[in-house]
Amino acid sequence: MNRLKDARTGKTLKRIEREIGRAYLDKPRLSQIENGKLNPVPGDIPAFLAAYGAEEVTELWDASDLDYGVKRPRSERKPDRNKKTGRIHIRTSQKIAKRFHAIRKRYGYHTGEQCFIAALDALEQEKKRTAPTAGTVETAGVSRSPQSNDSPSIGQGGQNVNDSSAISKPI
């Protein structure tokens, strides 16, 4: 419960409005703040204290009235030593950032981290699916099994790669 009406002591709302000096705090809004329907912006509290002649915030409001549910800035918080976290910062164009957020929302990911994890998982699955089979060696764009001794392999550009420098050797 606020005590603004009691603290006003004979001043009109028009006078309070002038003393606070904020264009967006007109008489109707001040009335709503006095009646407890709105809370002041935290940056305006010193102006309210001066206009209402109070020295402490607790003279005008209870602590529960001004609990905005806002956490302190990260720089002021104690680090959470139980979490092992890392930070990835990616600079990209606005077009790509908008695309990322659109995809994130389309697929129902609530955070960028969830979407990022899903993308990493999808990349790993794709890599496993397209990876060469065990025992196959890739050399100069040619995949061949070490057990095969069949016809010459053709590499990039159509040239024969069966010379001694490009022959696949068993692992």
Image: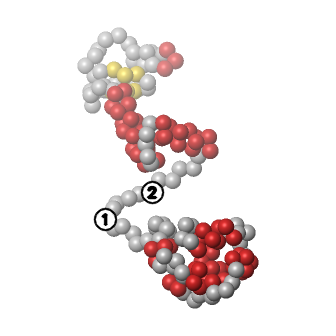
- 138 or 100, which lies in front? 100
Label 2 belongs to which residue? 87
Vertically, is 52 above or below 100?
below
Could you tell me if residue 112 is visible in this image? yes
Kindly identify the amino acid type of the residue bearing the numbered disc 1.
Asn
Disc on res. 82: 1
The residue that appears at 27% across and 28% down in the rendered structure is 134
Vertically, is 5 above or below 143?
below
The residue that appears at 62% across and 40% down in the rendered structure is 95
- 3 or 49, which lies in front? 3
- For the residue labelled by badge 2, is the local secondary structure a helix, a strand or a loop? loop
The residue that appears at 67% across and 67% down in the rendered structure is 28
Q: Earlier in the sequence, mark 1 or mark 2?
A: 1
Disc on res. 15: none
Is there CB contact under 8 Å for labels 1 and 2?
no
Task: Report the Cα–Cα distance between label 1 and label 2.
Answer: 16 Å
Kindly identify the amino acid type of the residue bearing the numbered disc 2.
Arg
Q: Where is residue 64 in the image (x, y as percent from the top left)?
A: 45, 74
Which residue is at the far top? 151
- 36 or 58, which lies in front? 36
Relative side of 78 to 48, left or right: left
Residue 155 image-quadrant placement: top left
Could you tell me if residue 39 is visible in this image? no
Q: Where is residue 38 in the image (x, y as percent from the top left)?
A: 56, 67
Numbered disc in front, either 1 or 2: 1
Vertically, is 116 above or below 126?
below
Q: Position of residue 170 (x, y in %)?
A: 27, 27
**Label 2 Cα crowd, 10 Å radius (few <14 / some 14-19 / many 20+):** few
Which residue is at the far front? 10
The residue that appears at 63% across and 75% down in the rendered structure is 44
- For the residue labelled by badge 1, is the local secondary structure a helix, a strand or a loop? loop
